[in-house]
Image (cartoon, helix red, strand yellow):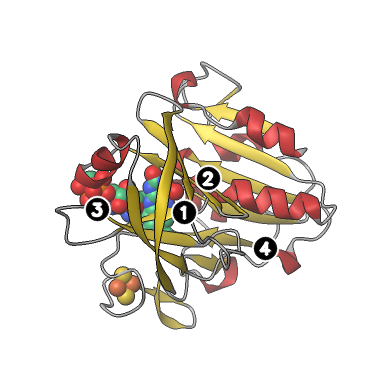
Amino acid sequence: MKQEIFRIEKNIPLTQNVFEMTLRGRSAGLAKAGQFVNIKLDGLYLRRPISVCDAEGDRLTLIYKVVGKGTEKMSEMSEGELDILIPLGNGYDLEKSGGAPLLIGGGVGVPPLYLLAKKLIAGSKKVTAILGFNTKGEVFYENEFKALGCDVIITTADGSYGKKGFVTDALPENYSYVYTCGPEPMLKAVYRAIKTSGQFSFEERMGCGFGACMGCTCETVSGYKRICRDGPVLEKEEIKWQTQG
Ligand SMILES: Cc1cc2nc3c(=O)[nH]c(=O)nc-3n(C[C@H](O)[C@H](O)[C@H](O)COP(=O)(O)OP(=O)(O)OC[C@H]3O[C@@H](n4cnc5c(N)ncnc54)[C@H](O)[C@@H]3O)c2cc1C
Ligand code: FES
């Protein structure tokens, strides 16, 4: 883990309350999709964790939803610098993907799947991405995933765009493995619905973000784990959820 200063290059709204921030800095070492950064913001004690959406050369792209003080501050920054801890977390393991991996993202669980899709496609995998949102106005990055070469399925809960329903209503017949990130109710539904193994990324509330405070601890099949350090990605078989009910 390193503390680096990044310069804000661009910070634009993708929807009413979701922003894409492009930064320049020493992002070398941010090699794994599914890792996250922890951002220091003036006047706030705790850093705010945000997944790496893309990292190439010295460019780092983050996508975040404005939900409170920290993300609101971020949305107001059109220039300047940010103090960022990189890289954090384990990230997704690409080795297990098989030939036709399925990526399932919900809301701001979509961003870490972008770098994952990019890497899987670079490895000649046939990638399908199901991106789930509540309504048409919340949809982002459909074209970006298509431009990578993914088969993209959009779902909206209210049916205003794409397929009506939840991500689990759009599962294809065949896929070799699943990678997913999103709100916990969605992860639980995916856990029950999928036919293969997979990896689940948790956006748990955090304290320190690097393993020191135990604030993000959760119980797994193999004992207690810190989501910030041992995760945020867990294997399906490690998760202690019921398959029914
Ligand atoms: C590993 C990881 C990766 C993440 N990646 C992204 C990402 O790519 N894009 C993105 O938009 N968000 C992401 N998040 C969530 C993001 O960290 C929080 O939304 C952010 O810290 C909220 O800060 P805030 O100061 O704006 O809100 P606060 O003022 O701290 O809180 C506002 C409200 O949001 C709730 N909240 C705060 N943190 C979380 C959380 N982690 N999960 C659910 N509710 C929360 C609070 O309880 C409160 O109700 C990620 C979280 C983790 C742990
Ligand atoms: S947030 Fe402190 S140990 Fe995970």
For ligand 1, tell me if the residue under mark 1 lies within 8 Å: yes
> Marks 2 and 1: in contact by CB < 8 Å?
yes
Q: In the rendered view, does 209 fall on the left or right side of 194?
A: left
Task: Work out how far the residue at label 4 is from the one at label 2, CA to CA, in angstroms.
Answer: 21 Å
| Residue at figure coordinates x 74%, y 61% from the top left | 97
The residue that label 1 is drawn on is 51
Q: Secondary structure at mark 2?
A: helix
- Badge number at residue 111: 2
Amino acid type, residue under disc 1 in the picture: Ser
Whether tag 4 and tag 2 are in contact, CB under 8 A, the answer is no
The numbered mark at residue 197 is: 4
Asked if the residues shown at circle 3 and circle 2 are in contact, with their CB atoms under 8 angstroms apart, the answer is no
The percent coordinates of residue 35 (x first, y second) are 51, 62
- The foreground one among 35 and 5 is 5
Going by the numbered disc 4, the residue's amino acid type is Ser
Closer to the chain start, of discs 3 and 1, is 3
Res. 41 mark: 3
Tag 4, which secondary structure?
loop
Residue 5 in picture, x, y percent from top left: 38, 59
Q: CA distance from mark 3 to mark 4?
A: 38 Å
The three-letter amino acid code for the residue at tag 2 is: Pro
Compare residues 77 and 20 and report the one nearer the observer: 77
**69 and 128: which is toward the camera:** 69
Does residue 220 sit above or below 139 in this rendering? below
Q: Residue 244, how many percent across, how many down?
A: 51, 56
Query: Toward the viewer: 77 or 92?
Result: 77
Residue found farthest to the top: 160
Amino acid type at circle 3 is Leu
Question: Among all residues in the image, which is located at the extreme left?
Answer: 43
Which numbered dot is residue 225? none
Dot 1 or dot 2, earlier in sequence:
1
